[in-house]
Amino acid sequence: MLLLLLILSFFNSQFLSAQVHNEKPLNAGEDESLFPEYEVEHLSEPPEGADTIFPVIFNGSLYSFSLGSSKPIWKIFIGGDLLNPFTVQNGDVYFYDIYNRLYAVDLRSGKVSWVSMIKEEIRGEPVIYGDYLIVSTFNGGIYVLIRSDGHLVYSYENEDEIIAGMNIYKNLLVVPFKSGKLVAYDMGSRKQQWSFGTNGIINVSPVVRDTSLYFGAWDGTFYALDVRTGKSKWIRYVGDNTTRDFLVFKNVIVLFFSKGEVVCLNRETGAIEWIKYFSGVDFNYNYFSGEKAMYVFLPDFTAFDPMNGGLLFDYRERAFNLYKEMLFDNMVEGKNPLSNEDRIGLLSDEFFSVDAFPYLPPARAGKNLVYFVTGNAYLYVYDLLKDFFILKYKMS
C-alpha cells in the first residue's frame, strides 16, 4: 500500500510541474474564434541578395524592415505597442499579439508558418532553446512549443506571477517570479534545478554573462549568482529598487534609477565603482549599451565610458566636427551658403541627429546594430562599430 501511494505521489508531482501535451497544437481552442484575425500586409519587395532584415513595433503593428532597401517589407497588426514581443532565429521571427497568439513568420517573405493560442497573458520575449520556443505568462505558466510547428510539448504551472523575461544558459531555463524568487529548470529532465529567493519584487529581466546571473529586486539590493548552481557570488545593497533594465559590460554593471541616478558596480565583487547624477533626466528606454560605451539620451544622444562614467562624446557635436570641413567648403565656394538653421537641419536630416526619445526599448539586429523608433515616429539604426547612425526613416 505504501509503495502504491509513493508511486501515485510521484506521478502527481510530475503532472503538476510539467504537463505533457503532444496531441494537438495550442490553436485548437474553442474560444479562438472570439478574437479578430489579421493578415500580413505586404508593403514592398525585399531586395535581392544578402540583406539585414529586422522586426519593428510601431503604431500597433509588427513590421519587417529591410536595411538594404531602407523601407518596410510587410506588417501585421498585433493590437498594441508591446515591449518588443519578438525573437529572431534563422530568418524567422517569433512574436505574440495582445490576444496572446504566438506567430512564426518568415522575415523576408511574410509567410506565416503557424499561429498558436496561449490562453494566458504572455510576458517577456519568447525564448529559443534548440528546436523549442518558450514563453512565460503573467499567471506563472511556462509553455514549451516545437519551433517548427507550434505544437505544445509540455508546460510548467506555477502559483507565482511572472512580469519579467526569462533567460537560457545552456540547458537551464531561468525564470524570475514577481514574488522575488528565481527558479532554474533543467530543459533535459524538465525538473527544477535550483531556486533562489529575495525580499522584493523582480520586474526586470536578469542578465546572464559567462557563468554569472545578475539581477536586482525591490529590496534595494542587487545580486550575482552562479547560474549553474544558483549559489550567491555577491550581494550589494544599492539603496534603491531595480525597476529599469541594467547594462552589463566586461568589467562593470551599470544600474539606472529614478531621478537621474546611475550606479556602477564591479562585476567580480559588486563594489560600487562610481555614482553619477543627471539633472532633469528620468531613465526609461533612453539608453543602451555598446561593447565599450553606454549611450544615453539627455536629450542629446551622448556616449559615456562605463568604467568611470566619463563623457566620450556628444553625438551632435561629433557629427558636426566630422562634417565641418564639408560644410565649410560649401560656404566658402558659395554653392550652398549655410546658416545656423541650415546646419542644424543638415545634421538632423542628413546625419541623423536624434531629437526625441525611444518610446520602446532599443533592440538589436545582429551583433553590431541597435535600432529604435522615437516618439516622433522616426526609426533610427545605430552601427556600434562605426559609432554612427546609418539610417533615419519616417514611419507612417
Image (tube, rainbow, N blue to C red):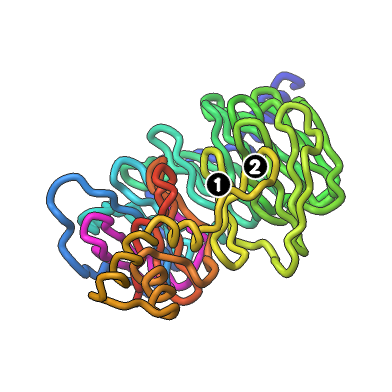
* Closer-to-camera residue (126/334): 334
The residue labelled by disc 2 is 306
Assess whether mark 2 and mark 1 are in contact (beta carbons under 8 angstroms): yes
Residue 72 is covered by the magenta coloring: yes
The residue furthest top is 3
Number of callouts = 2
Q: Was residue 356 drawn as part of the magenta stretch in this picture?
A: no
Q: Where is residue 126 in the image (x, y as percent from the top left)?
A: 48, 48
Spot occupied by residue 206 in the image (x, y as percentages of width and height): 65, 42
- Residue located at (55% from left, 57% from top): 314
Amino acid type at mark 1:
Ser
Side (left or right) of 309 relative to 274 = left
The residue positioned 37% from the left and 64% from the top of the image is 351
Q: Nearer the viewer, residue 186 or 247?
A: 247
SS assignment at label 1: strand
> Dot 1 corresponds to which residue?
289
With 69 as the anchor, is 16 left or right in this view? right
In the image, residue 212 sits, relative to residue 343, either above or below, namely: above
The numbered disc on residue 381 is none
Q: Can residue 366 be seen in this view?
A: yes
Q: Which amino acid does label 2 sit on?
A: Pro
Q: Identify the residue at image location x=28%, y=56%.
A: 67
Decide: few, some or many residues near mark 1? Use Cα within 10 Å; few <14, some 14-19, many ≥20. Answer: many
List the single residue furthest toward the left.
Answer: 48
Please provide the residue range marked out in magenta: 60-87
x and y, in percent, of residue 361 in the image: 54, 59
Indicate the quadrant where residue 19 lies: top right
1 vs 2, front mark: 2
